[in-house]
Amino acid sequence: MSSYRQPGIVFTDRRFTVPLDHGDPGGETIEIFGREAVASDRAADQLPWLVYLEGGPGFGARRFVGAEAWLGRAVREFRVLLLDQRGTGLSTPVNRQTLPARGGPSAQADHLAHFRSDSIVRDCELIRPQLTDGAPWTVLGQSFGGFCAVRYLSAAPEGLEAVLITGGLPSLDAHADDVYRAAYPRIERKVAAHYARYPQDVARARAIAAYLAEHRPDSAGHTLTPEGFQSLGIMLGGGSGSHQLHYLLENAFVEGPHGAELSDAFQEAMRTATSFAGHPLYALVHEAIYGQGAQPTDWAAERVRAEFPQFDAATALAGEGPVLFTGESIHPWHFEVDPALRPLRETAELLAARTDWPALYDAERLAANEVPVAAAVYHDDMYVDTGHALRTASSIHGLRTWVTSEYEHDGLRAGGSHVLDRLLALVRGESDR
């Protein structure tokens, strides 16, 4: 362990050893990293623990600088563990460089099957007693971290003092097809709102998509395509995302010796925004997080997109309509254009075809839940369907919801202490507002 100070906070880096496969506790192990955070003036106090589970899948916990955002509020009363879920951050990494050591694509796919919420929760239950002397702790789950929290309530509620969820109530039984069938209309609404705010972006997006369709430029090995450009719509799910997308589009072209061409600045910004080099696990297991039972996910986002032809860039360019952006979805072409994913295409295909996914949620146990739970549900959340979330909320006994249009999906980051205060009040029964 190593400890160090930042303004208002003492951080301690911690590492834990857990089984790769919790069904084989004596087998291969991996390392899990967590960063403990405690207020400087409370470092010697006996405080209850809160474990933070980041959104994703595939992202390590946020790297805070001192007592900023919601962390500053949390450390007033908790000792916080910012957990890098397995395969992310400083936990034993999973990427194109490490996976070949597992063997061929089949072995790699089998390995990746251990990186869903069920394994993450079992990691937490091995780590918890090492920190709390066996006492239950509070979980704060953002987005996919909330999916993990619902799995926690299903599998090990005895480890939980309370659960706080922000934008992360999953459907208990929806197939990935259902998830994306609900998602595309939400995305279309977000795109329409963006074009209403910035009507000049309609022509800009058409011009960019047309250029990419003709030229397919290469940026540091990353092939830029119309579909990749459309995926920039993932930005529209955040509070400032529409504005960020507008600024990205406004300097797309420069006048070269042969006419207008995409600027280096735009190409680099697009490559950076669409590359999975920093979080390949997100692309690899994104649909697998919905897998339950024998039905394969089978590239659900790609198949369901065919039901919404208005999202086809070629069709839009052939006509008069706007080029629609897409949102949080992974497609086979991601594994063709992105150098961080290309070597893993066959592995991804095997995961998409997998038919032995264990169930993640226990509806009966959730209906009998006794753990205090509060959840922020963001109205018309682009990433997590509000209807699915509210149905799940009604299925978990005692769960209290705060449905709000004040924030988008990144409300915990944007709202900071206000969001955490609201959830703590709800989970403690101190507020019905």
Image (tube, rainbow, N blue to C red):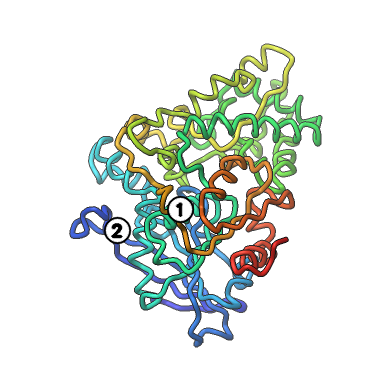
Horizontal and vertical percent position of residue 138: 49, 68
SS label for mark 1:
helix
Residue 393, disc = none
Q: Quadrant of residue 266?
A: top right
Residue position marked by numbered label 2 in the rendering:
30
Whether residue 201 is visible to the viewer of this picture, yes or no, is yes
Q: Nearer the viewer, residue 422 or 211?
A: 422
Horizontal and vertical percent position of residue 101: 25, 46
- Classify the position of the N terminus by image quarter: bottom left
Task: Specify the amino acid type for callout 1.
Answer: Leu
Q: Residue at x 37, y 51 (%)?
A: 118
Of marks 1 and 2, the one in the foreground:
1
Q: Quadrant of residue 111?
A: top left
Question: Does residue 73 sit above or below 251 in this rendering?
Answer: below
Q: Residue at x 69, y 21 (%)?
A: 258
Q: Nearer the viewer, residue 354 or 369?
A: 369
Question: Does residue 211 sit above or below 61 in this rendering?
Answer: above
- Classify the position of the C terminus by image quarter: bottom right
Residue position marked by numbered label 1 in the rendering:
366
Task: Specify the amino acid type for callout 2.
Answer: Ile
Q: Is residue 295 left or right of residue 147?
A: left
